């Protein structure tokens, strides 16, 4: 069974209430976890989406950079295109964000994706309001089609390094 199908089956059975419900699915060498805010027949509303392979050895820095560039290039189906923003060779982590955030009046919304040297990826949707310091996390709304594509693309890019 695919990781995506397992995720949808668990999401369909998860109670959704006032607080997002923790959800974690392991299939083969992968674990997908999040807090499920809502799930319907065509889309999910998620917080703290994280995909991680079974722990293994850390990658060298060139693999982190290579995967970061591939993710920014190939994950082209979200609301905004992604671009590599920052990479730290000491910590082995890379940050990818929307290249051009969506603007709604004084609100700017963007994706933030982090990749660490063990192949773990997290994706969040953030909102910044002009005049406020910092940003806050907002629900990440993905159609089932885009969620399947996201999981599959990340497995292809990172999978060859962990399996």
Image (tube, grey):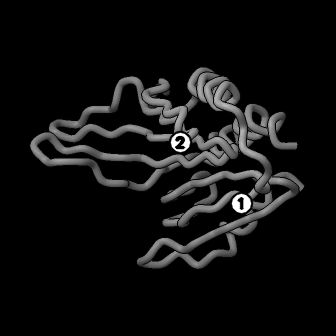
Q: Quadrant of the N terminus?
A: bottom right
Of 89 and 78, the residue lying toward us: 89
Q: Mark 2 points at which residue?
A: 91
Q: Position of residue 65 (x, y in %)?
A: 61, 26
Number of residues whose C-alpha sits closer than 10 Å to that of mark 1, classed few (under 14), some (14–19) or many (20 or more): many
Q: Position of residue 24 (x, y in %)?
A: 68, 67
Count of numbered labels shown in the rendering: 2
Residue at the location (43% across, 55% down)? 139
Residue 67 badge: none
In which quarter of the view is residue 44 placed? bottom right
Q: Mark 1 points at which residue?
A: 8
Find numbered disc 2 in the image and state the secondary structure of the residue it sits on. Answer: loop
Q: Quadrant of the C terminus?
A: top right
Residue at the location (84% across, 54% down)? 29
Nearer the camera: disc 2 or disc 1? 2
In which quarter of the view is residue 80 placed? top left
Number of residues whose C-alpha sits closer than 10 Å to that of mark 2, classed few (under 14), some (14–19) or many (20 or more): few
Residue at the location (87% across, 56% down)? 28
């Amino acid at each position: 069974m695919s990781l995506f199908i397992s995720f949808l089956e668990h999401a369909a059975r998860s109670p959704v209430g006032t607080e997002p419900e923790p959800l974690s699915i392991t299939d083969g060498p992968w674990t997908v976890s999040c807090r499920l805010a809502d799930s319907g027949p065509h889309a999910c509303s998620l917080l703290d989406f994280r995909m991680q392979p079974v722990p293994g050895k850390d990658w060298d820095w060139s693999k982190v950079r290579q995967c970061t560039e591939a993710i920014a290039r190939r994950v082209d189906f979200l609301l905004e295109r992604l671009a590599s923003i920052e990479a730290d060779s000491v910590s082995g982590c890379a940050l990818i964000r929307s290249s051009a955030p969506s603007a709604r009046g004084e609100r700017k919304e963007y994706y933030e994706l982090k990749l660490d040297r063990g192949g773990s990826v997290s994706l969040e949707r953030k909102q910044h309001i002009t005049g406020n310091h910092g940003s806050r996390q907002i629900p990440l709304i993905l159609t089932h089609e885009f969620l399947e594509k996201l999981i599959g693309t990340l497995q292809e890019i990172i999978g060859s390094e962990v399996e």
